[in-house]
Image (cartoon, rainbow, N blue to C red):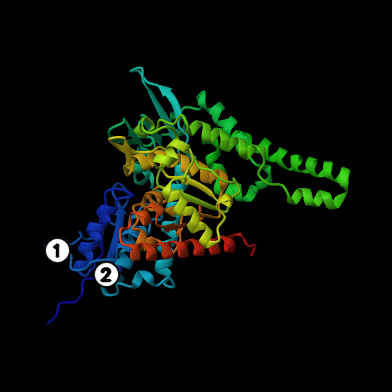
Amino acid sequence: MASPPQTDPVRITVSGADDFEGWRESARNLADAGVEPARVVWTVEGSDGDLFAGEAPKPDLAPSFSVPRPFVDLAKAVVCHSDPERFALLYALLWKLRTNRQALEDRADPLVDRLERLAKEVRRDAHKMHAFVRFREVAEEDGGTRFIAWFEPDHHIVRREAGFFVRRFANMRWSILTPELSIHWDGEVVTEGPGAIRADAPDGDPLEETWKTYYASIFNPARLKVKAMTKEMPRKYWRNMPETSLVAPLIAGARARELEMIDRSAGKDGMDAAIAAERRLEPGGNLRAAWEALMTDARSCTRCELYKCGTQTVFGEGPLDARILFVGEQPGDQEDLAGRPFVGPAGQLFNSSLEQAGIDRSQTYVTNAVKHFKFEQRGKRRIHSKPDAGEIEACRWWQEQERALIKPSLTVALGATAARSLTGKTLTISRAREAPLILADGSECWVTVHPSFLLRIPEEDRRAEERTRFVSDLKRIKARSEELSTPA
């Protein structure tokens, strides 16, 4: 006679609020043991649990099923959410995947929809952390300096995002303090500490006046949308950011500056001209000045060792209201000598392909993921050398500032290095080029090959085939850019 199914609850305690590995191991054991989701009580170590729940089973056999990779990525994000039901929700979906590997593709399923929303909120919180952490310099007892920041995340993202700050600020010692825990980087090792309070972080340093000057110079009243700004930069973060002390007076003065311009035009030429003047309000001197300041700073960049290579920094070029922004890999030999992107053989191929696709290069902004020429010296020749992950990450800041100023409706990654710089991930071009990726700021990124790839193909027939496909990519990009620029 078969034994009746067990109904006693099973308690699972994970070691931390963001313990993905602990959840994954326990969830697999539960699923292999046939424990239904309704029986499982998930708790975090140190929190109150169900004292009468039984212990989790520990099967001796290897896991009996696999899950799609997108589920793992989803789970890693959702585990960092603050929703107390996150572990149970993920296990419920894992239970479905045991018998239906396509369960995650059913976006009409309320469970899948809820988990996707939780993951999106975690990614958005991470984006806020990247954007709104502000370090202040303090002196240490050993005579050195440390940069300290205070941040209040909505979710358990601090450990998850530590690697971002290590890559971005690898050459300085820093600490990020949050109410839940703190992370510290000494230039070699990341360590953790207990949570802190706002008073533990410094209030300001001399660098903040420079930053305020820069922020004021790029503030553009013609593009001011207060609701959109406060949505992207919630007021809860303002007290940690030096530039926000300028926001109120800048907002107050923005409309006054517009009205002054309109009034001047109305007094001179009448109301029709005044209306036309308001419609012509476009990025002006502030935007150009900010871009020129950025380019000047880039010329003295020492973020990685590549500043010792080549002749000069090769910055981007093009109109600052460009709808399409192209990102290549790095300057080549001729670009390094000329100080301009895409002027060598790959640039000539790029230009002719743009022309075939109906894209006017002079109306696009063109830059590179890495701004210095990395090469190997062979006799009198300088041979291109691919930038490594650290160099890409170190230079990523410049590309991000260019995009932040220009705000293109569409960004194009030319090759794997550009794709990694824009997304922070290693991508396969063949898989990524068919549909757009969504960047952290919500804009679209299209991926295609780098023109130099076409030059390296030895077979003439294949080279012609790949060139045709590249032009087709550019035509599709042009059409999409026009769609995005057309008012709904």
Residue 206, relative to residue 232: is it above or below? above
Residue type of the residue flagged with mark 2: Glu
Residue 142, relative to residue 165: is it above or below? above
Q: Nearer the viewer, residue 66 or 360?
A: 360
Q: Mark 1: which secondary structure?
A: loop
The image quadrant of residue 264 is top right
* Residue occupying image coordinates x 38% and y 33%: 310
Residue type of the residue flagged with mark 1: Ala
| Residue behind mark 2 | 36
The image quadrant of residue 463 is bottom left
Q: Residue 337's x, y, as percent?
A: 44, 36
Quarter of the rendering occupied by the N terminus: bottom left
Question: What's the mark number on residue 299?
Answer: none
Q: Residue 92's x, y, as percent?
A: 32, 67
| Residue behind mark 1 | 62
Tell me if I can see residue 234 in this picture: no
* Residue occupying image coordinates x 29% and y 57%: 50
